[in-house]
Image (spheres, rainbow, N blue to C red):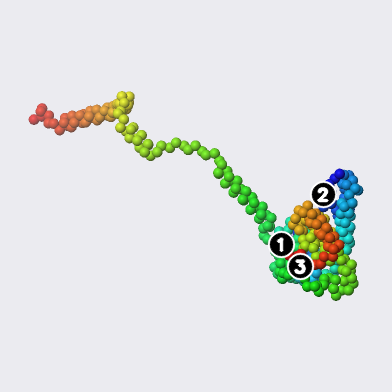
Amino acid sequence: MTDETLARWWQEGSDAAFAELVGRFYGRIFNFLWHATGHREDAEDLTQETFLAAHRSIPRYQPARTFGPWLFGIARHTLADHWRRQRPCDELPPDFADPISTSENAPAAREERGSALWQQARRLKPRQFEALWLRYGEGFDIAGVARALGITRIHAKVLLFRARKELARRAGSGKGRTKGDRL
Amino acid sequence: MMACWISRLWLIRHADEYGATPPARLARHLAGCASCRAQREMHRNLATRLAATASHREPPPFLAARIVAAARAAAPYRRPAVSVHRLRWTGAVMIALTAGLSLWLAIRPAKTPRPVAAPLELAALVRETISRPMQLADQQRLTMVTRSLAQPLEQEWQRIQADANGAWHTLAADFTPSPAAP
C-alpha cells in the first residue's frame, strides 16, 4: 500500500489510514526535527504538532503528489514557527553543549560524535540544513527536496551547492555556532 | 579553454550525482583545471559522507499513540460533503461563465433601434389627416356607398306606403255607408 493511497483514504475519513501513516512517518519526522532542534522533548512536541497540522491540512493534499515531501513541508513550517517562538539571542552561551552529543544514551552519543559533519551542518542556516537533511538524511531526490521546501528544482540545487560549500568551509575553519544563523 | 564559471554551473547541477558524466568539453576542462577538479571532488565526497553519517535515532515508542490520540481528541476529521477540489472547480467555472457573459455584453454589436414616431409627431399626423379637404374621388366613393345603402331602403319605404294606402282604402270602403241603402 503506497503512502499516497493511504493519504487518499485519510482524506476520506479513515482513522486507520491516518494511524498507519503516523506509524510510517513519525520516526522520520522525529529524526528530522531532533537533528534540527537538538532537543529530544522539542522534537517530540514538534512531531505531534506536525501531524496535527497535517490532520487539519489533509483536505488540501493532492494525491497525485508524493506524500513524503508534503508532510516534511508541514514539518518544516512547524519548525519555522518553533524558531519564531524562541527567545531571540545573538550568541549561545559558551558552555552550550549539543544535546545530541550529551544524550543519556551512551552508545548513541558515541555514534553522534562520529557524525561531526552533521553537527556542523546543524549550525548552517535553517534552510540549508533542511535541504541537506532532506537530500542526504532522508534520501529525497531533488524534486522531493524542492517540493518539501516549496522552491524550484534549480533553486534546490543551488541551495544544496551553497550548503555543501559553506559546510566545507566551516568544517575546515571550525567556525562556532551562533544562534543568529537560525534567525 | 572553457571558463571556470561554466564548469561551476555544471557542478551546481550535478556535483552530488555520481552517475552524471560530464560532457566532453567539461571533462577536458576538469582534466586541465585543478581548482574545478578539487571543487568537484569536494562536493562529491561531502555528499557521500553526509549520506553515510546521517544517523537515525529511534523515536520514543509512545509517540505514535500519543499523536493518534491527540489528533482524534483535537478535531476528528470528517470528509466534507462536497470535496474541496469540486468546490474549487465549480467556483472557477462560475467565475469564468460570469466573466464571459460580462465580456459578451460589453463587446456585443449594438442593435439598430426600430424607428418609432414620437407622440408629438403622431399627433401632428392625425391632425393633418383630419383637417385635409376631402378629394373628389373620396366624394364619389362616398356617394356610391350611400346610394347602395339608400336604394333598398327607399324601395322598402314605397312598399310600406302602398300597403298603408291599400289598408286605408279597405277600411274606408267598409265603414262608409252605401248611398243606395234606404
Disc 3, SS: helix
Label 1 and label 3 in one chain: yes
Residue holding disc 2: B5
Assess whether mark 3 and mark 2 are in contact (beta carbons under 8 angstroms).
Answer: no
Secondary structure beneath disc 2? helix
What amino acid is found at the position of numbered circle 1 in the picture? Ser
Mark 2 and mark 3, same subunit? no
Q: Examine the image and state in which quarter residue B159 appears.
A: top left
Mark 3 residue type: Lys
Q: In the rendered view, does B155 fall on the left or right side of A127?
A: left
| For discs 1 and 3, the disc positioned in front in the rendered view | 3
Residue located 86% across and 54% down the image: B39
Q: Residues within 10 Å of mark 1 (few under 14, many from 20)?
A: some
Estimate the x, y position of residue B13 in percent, counting from the top left: 82, 51
Residue where numbered disc 1 is placed: A57
Label 2, label 3: how many angstroms apart (C-alpha)?
33 Å
Which amino acid lies under the numbered mark 2 shown in the image of this protein?
Trp
Res A53 → quadrant: bottom right
Q: Which residue is mark 3?
A: A179
Binning the other alpha carbons within 10 Å of mark 3 as few (below 14), some (14 to 19) or many (20 upward) gives some
Q: Are marks 1 and 3 in contact (CB under 8 Å)?
A: no
